[in-house]
Image (cartoon, rainbow, N blue to C red):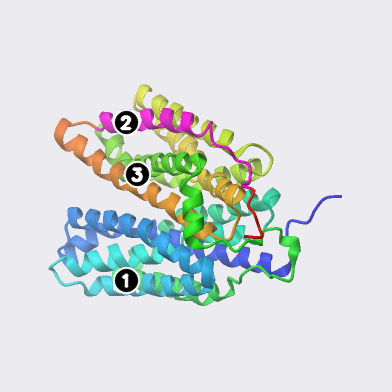
């Protein structure tokens, strides 16, 4: 007999709610680069300042994921996401009013938006949804959430381009503020699993404290390896997202090619995350992750070796897009599978912070190598080496659930 995907109504509502929230939060984030020229013209914010704001955003996002994760595990994701989305909306609302000093701009686009993403993006909502599903369906549910984020990343830039043609950029930001406020209201449907309904099979019956959970995680070799591997993910996707448009132009391709690559990444990421979610519920997650990082290295290598052409660029967008955020269902799934779901948001928040440290270096080193050596090649070589590293370190991870003394 085939088991139902949804064991109760709450699981369905939480999944639907989480999908909408990440659709909005990640979609809005994907549009920031489209406003850089307007920031320069009307706010006197240079591209360097705007880039710094995005870098600050990445670090704040990663750091706050840990603390918001602790809050969500204890009090519920609905309050954490509501607060984060309202801070996110406030930051976007205040951007047009930034004085020319640049510091408030860093606060609004960097700190406020980083806090918002920490409580409303996929790394927060995937653990929230995972608590409502048993292990054999958890990765599929995570894949649906991540695919919704990808859909937002694909559609919101198109929405922004359309409205920027017919109205002021500040009014476009107000439209996004409205989306974020609606998402904040809807986030109140993010309920905890029903304790009386044991069919979810995600409840932990132990009384493990926060300190005990941290000690247990950092004593587990597999968790350390997973944290290290997610650094590679952050480095690679941020390197591509930040520098591939300039890279293809340096190789003689037209400017629209870089935009096409990013658009294809967003589109094919939907299929990649859904596929990984399905496979991760059937096969070893560590093997899938190892294979994924190996394919990333192959994809980058082919992209570098092939002669520059529109076809090779579009092939890269499609292939790398399929592998883009497909790491999330399997990575979060391993954490839940080993340690359970009681402290999942906090434990995955630590893993994600490593991702954001990698993101910082991916963005920074790409520009550093280009400015000092006149080429992005060294950054790409480093990315390939990191793929080999990630391919190897995921293989020894022990995915078996930990056995605890529940009477303690």
Q: Judge whether residue 225 is colored magenta.
A: no
Task: State the image coordinates of residue 93 (x, y, percent, origin top left).
Answer: 32, 74
Marker disc for residue 91: 1
Q: Which residues are magenta?
A: 376-402
Is 55 above or below relative to 42?
above
Q: Residue 61 sits in which quadrant? A: bottom left
Q: Judge whether residue 394 is colored magenta.
A: yes
Residue at the location (40% across, 69% down)? 176
The quarter of the image holding the C terminus is bottom right
Report whether residue 122 is seen: no
Mark 3 is surrounded, within 10 Å at the Cα level, by few (under 14), some (14 to 19) or many (20 or more) other residues, namely: many
Q: Which residue is mark 2?
A: 382
Instruction: Please name which of the two marks, 1 or 2, marks the residue nearer to the observer.
Output: 2
Q: Which residue is mark 3?
A: 358
Q: Nearer the viewer, residue 359 or 272?
A: 359
Labels 1 and 2: the sequence-earlier one: 1
Which SS class for mark 3? helix
Labels 2 and 3: the sequence-earlier one: 3
Is 2 above or below relative to 185?
above
Residue at the location (71% across, 61% down)? 200
Mark 1 is surrounded, within 10 Å at the Cα level, by few (under 14), some (14 to 19) or many (20 or more) other residues, namely: many
Q: Nearer the viewer, residue 242 or 73?
A: 73
Task: State the image coordinates of residue 204 (x, y, percent, origin top left).
Answer: 64, 60
Residue at the location (38% across, 59% down)? 29
Residue 104 falls left or right of residue 78: left
Is 30 above or below relative to 183?
above
Disc 1/disc 3 C-alpha distance (Å): 25 Å
């Amino acid at each position: 007999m085939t088991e139902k995907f949804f064991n109760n109504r709450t699981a369905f509502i939480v999944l639907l709610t989480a999908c909408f929230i990440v659709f909005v939060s990640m979609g809005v984030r994907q549009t920031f680069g489209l406003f850089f020229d307007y920031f320069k013209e009307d706010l006197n914010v240079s591209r360097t300042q705007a880039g710094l704001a995005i870098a600050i955003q990445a670090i704040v996002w990663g750091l706050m994921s840990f603390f918001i994760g602790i809050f969500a595990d204890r009090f519920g994701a609905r309050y954490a996401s509501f607060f984060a989305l309202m801070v996110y909306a406030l930051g976007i609302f205040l951007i047009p009013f930034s004085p020319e000093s640049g510091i408030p701009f860093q606060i609004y686009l960097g700190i406020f938006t980083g806090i918002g993403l920490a409580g409303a993006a996929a790394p927060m909502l995937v653990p929230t949804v995972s608590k409502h599903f048993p292990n054999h369906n958890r990765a599929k549910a995570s894949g649906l959430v991540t695919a919704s984020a990808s859909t937002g990343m694909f559609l919101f830039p198109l929405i922004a381009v359309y409205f920027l043609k017919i109205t002021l950029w500040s009014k476009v930001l107000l439209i996004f503020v409205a989306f974020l406020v609606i998402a904040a209201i809807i986030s109140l449907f993010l309920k905890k699993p029903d304790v009386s309904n044991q069919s979810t099979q995600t409840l932990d019956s132990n009384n493990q404290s926060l300190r005990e959970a941290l000690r247990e995680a950092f004593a587990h070799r597999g968790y350390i390896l997973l944290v290290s591997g997610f650094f590679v993910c952050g480095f690679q996707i941020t390197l591509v997202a930040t520098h591939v448009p300039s890279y293809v132009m340096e190789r003689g391709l037209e400017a629209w090619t870089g935009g096409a690559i990013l658009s294809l990444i967003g589109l094919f990421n939907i299929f990649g995350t859904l596929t990984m979610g399905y496979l991760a519920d059937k096969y070893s997650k560590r093997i899938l992750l190892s294979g994924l990082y190996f394919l990333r290295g192959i994809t980058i290598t082919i992209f570098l070796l092939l002669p520059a052409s529109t076809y090779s660029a579009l092939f890269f967008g499609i292939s790398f897009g399929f592998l883009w955020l497909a790491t999330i269902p399997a990575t979060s799934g391993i954490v839940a599978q080993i340690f359970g779901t009681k402290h999942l948001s906090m434990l995955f928040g630590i893993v994600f912070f490593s991702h954001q440290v990698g993101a910082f270096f991916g963005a920074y080193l790409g520009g550093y190598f280009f400015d000092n050596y006149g080429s992005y090649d060294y950054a790409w070589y480093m990315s390939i080496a990191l793929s080999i590293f990630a391919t190897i370190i995921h293989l020894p991870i022990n995915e078996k659930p930990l056995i605890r003394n529940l009477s303690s």
